[in-house]
Amino acid sequence: MNLSYQVFDLPLKHTFTIAHQSRDIQDTIIVKLEENGLFGLGESTTNPFYGMTIENMSACVEEFRPVVESKFWNTPEQLWELGRDVFQNNPFAQCALDLAAWDLFTKKQGKKLYEYLQLNPEKIPITNFTIGIDTVEKMVAKMKEVDWPIYKIKLGTDNDLEIVRELRKHTQSVFRIDANCAWTAEQAIRNSEELVKLGVEFMEQPLGKDDLEGMKEVFQYSKLPVMADESCIVESDVKKCHGLFHAINVKLVKAGGITPGLRMIREAKLLGMKTMVGCMTESSVGITAIAHLAPLLDYVDMDGAMLLAKDPARGVQITPEKVTFPKGPGIGAELV
């Protein structure tokens, strides 16, 4: 078993702004596992909000290298458990390794990941396409650049409702709203009354992740369903979100990969909550992994590679009509 990794700067087509940050380039690390002529790829992006850098992710991967290469594991789940202590404070790095392990493992089985998980690729929800915070004119231009049936609109400004009203004039597509922790409970409830009239499907993470009392109020009085994102990072958060949110957005990089992500999705379903897997502007390596899980989900946010000016990988092809997976077994993405 050989472990290696590469670092890439992913240039974005447009400056991407959300409530607490802006960026033009997304740094990412792509891990590669090779054995007996087969390889598996996994990915995780950096994120200053969570303190995840190329330096601390690569340091964790290096610390865990002896375990990976000594081959004390046969399945991705076994590898994930072996890394529980090393990656305790760096699930982003664990995600990159976990995705690579799943890619390699399912290639050895001669099955695509969705086949191994016994999922139907014909039952994949349409991904949303994200419109970051900008001037109204530029947000409208971004929608016209990519005509899509579902838009996720990033909010967290002083004129959020005015933005949505103006965008609604230019499309009949479904809107999803993501405030990235920017509102108070009072604002969220009040905004929901107007947003439901504007064709919004749900609100994602309207309040700060620790504002549990506020979320109880929003959950009770909002005119729209509410979805957890920042409030649902790891497995133990799923149960905490029950009764506060109608749905959860599982980010594989934040959770630590496919292995815990699958457990989070299953637990949420048992609790009667809807599920989504979201992206962090990954290349086609990370996005293709998400696509394999999409048949499990009520919603999916896998537009990351579509936001890039240059993609260092190729993998799943996504249109509003269909999702086309790479040929061959495994997750199937590859570097170009």
Image: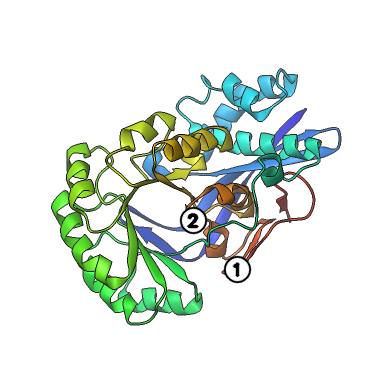
Q: Which mark is residue 301?
A: 2
Which tag, 2 or 1, sits closer to the chain's start? 2
* Circle on res. 319: 1
Q: Nearest the camera: 255 or 91?
A: 255
Identified at 47% across, 44% down, the residue is 251
Instruction: Identify whether 330 is placed above or below 71.
Output: below
> Height in image: 211 above or below 326?
above
Question: Which residue is pictured at 51% across the width and 41% down the height?
Answer: 252
Task: Please say if 202 is above or below 7.
Answer: below
Left/right of residue 306 with respect to residue 22 in the rendered view: right
Location of residue 206 in the rendering, given as x and y in whole percent from the top left corner: 26, 52
Name the secondary structure under disc 2: loop
Residue drawn at x 60%, y 50% is 8
Is residue 283 in sight in this rendering? yes
Q: Quadrant of residue 104?
A: top right
Helix, strand or loop at disc 1?
loop
Q: CA distance from mark 2 to mark 1?
A: 13 Å
Q: Is 289 positioned to the left or the right of 162 in the image?
A: right
Q: Residues within 10 Å of mark 1 (few under 14, many from 20)?
A: few
The color scheme shown is rainbow
**Mark 2: which amino acid?**
Asp
Cβ atoms at labels 2 and 1 below 8 Å apart? no
The image shows residue 62 at horizontal and vertical percentages of 62, 27
196 and 93: which one is in front?
196
The residue lying at 54 percent from left, 37 percent from top is: 262
Which quadrant would the C terminus be assigned to in this image? bottom right
**Residue at the limit of the structure toward the bottom, as seen here:** 169
- Percent position (x, y) of residue 283? 60, 54
Quadrant of the image occupied by residue 188: bottom left
17 vs 332, left or right, is left
Identity of the amino acid at label 1?
Answer: Thr
